[in-house]
Amino acid sequence: MSIRIATFNAENLFRRPVVFGIEDDAKRNKVLDDFRKLVEILEKDEYSDKNKADIIEILLAHSVDVSQEISTQTILVNEPKGMARLLKGEGRNIQVRAEVTGRPSWVGWAELDRKDLTLDALQNTAKVIAEVNADILLTVEVEDRLTLHRFNQQVLHGQIGAPAYPFNLLIDGNDIRGIDVGILSRHPITSIRSHIFDKENVQDLFPIFSRDCPEFEIDIDGEPLWLLGNHFKSKRGGGGAEKRKQQGKRAAKIYQEALGRSDRVVVAGDLNDTPDSEALKPLLNAGLQDAMTHGGYQGPPGTHGECKAADKIDYLMFSPELFGKVTRARVETRGIAESAVTFDSVHGPQDQASDHAALFADLDL
């Protein structure tokens, strides 16, 4: 039987953090760096006067509750009603309440403010998925399982008219921005293993995976196929290269353990690095082979933006048993605004499906 497996970083389905729409790299990175700093400060058990001053400085620069004239309007502090709050005052006059001495003394969190994607963007994302027409599709950067289900039913099927997938699954990962790793499948998903709690050492503060490395077991006519999905640490922000290297080593180990259950294993997703990187070495050294190295691949050398060789960051990697059954591989680039050929409904970054191509491969099982 022939089966098509694909991966696609959809860059959210219905709503996306406002910051990701900032085209200026320096301004976008400034928001993300300040957000990381704010989250780190807010998690402290005790706030110094300097911590409190930094909280207010960041919020004045970026909070949606502050004047448009002085704020990027990208960060939101969620606080419950009542007295267990972080802030007092409004607009430019916000202050940390005197009663707030640290994390235990208030209830709430900071998050990146989101806005709805345009209908054209939703439909272009669905067009990519419909054109790829995969039997098994790894979905990267999707908000949650119910969002994936609604998109599947209401946009892919309802708006575009493509068949809805009968199976979808997603476990919320470690990223608070709503960019999780899920799956759409025409074959039953019989089990899932999550790695959101994996740490290199028990005493480590942070888990290995920025999102997760879910293992999806899929029943293909009575035979199991394991799909390991991932979204490695972005190149934006500090420490990315070392974090991706750590994630690559752990993903390679999970792959080798999966081989003990089946010789049909796929590692896929947005690994945020090139094939010659240190992050990819453990996976390639473990015997995995990427679909774009297959003799049946036709298309550009990259998967992101202009899809040049330096833009190769999305992967479909197969165990030797499966790679030998690959017959062809392609990328679907028409949803990218920078692509030489686009869907008629893609007019620019505001309505593109994603700045990632969908990568797919056909296998003769």
Image (tube, rainbow, N blue to C red):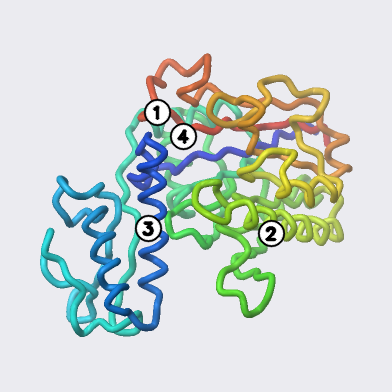
Q: Amino acid at mark 3?
A: Phe
Q: Which mark is residue 61?
A: none
Residue 35 marker: 3
Disc 4 marks a residue whose amino acid type is His
Name the element at disc 1.
Answer: loop
Structural crowding at the residue carrying mark 2, measured as other residues with C-alpha within 10 Å and reported as few (<14), some (14–19) or many (≥20) = many
Name the element at disc 3. helix
In the picture, the quarter occupied by the N terminus is top right
Callout 4: SS: helix
User: Between 196 and 100, which is closer to the camera in this rendering?
Assistant: 100
- Separation of residues labelled 1 and 3 (CA atoms): 24 Å
Q: Residue at x 14, y 51 (%)?
A: 67
Residue 257 against residue 224 in the figure, above or below: below
The residue type indicated by label 1 comes to Pro
**What residue occupies the far front of the structure in this picture?**
50
- Looking at the picture, which amino acid does disc 2 mark? Gln
Residue 349, labelled with which disc?
1
Labels 2, 1: front one? 2
Front one among 225 and 335: 335
Give the x, y percent position of residue 105: 29, 84
Mark 1 or mark 3, which has the lower sequence index? 3
Q: List x then y, in percent, for residue 248.
A: 71, 54
- Residue identified by numbered label 2: 246
Labelled disc at residue 157: 4
Quarter the C terminus occupies: top right
Q: CA distance from mark 3 to mark 4?
A: 37 Å
- Badge nearest the viewer, 1 or 3: 3
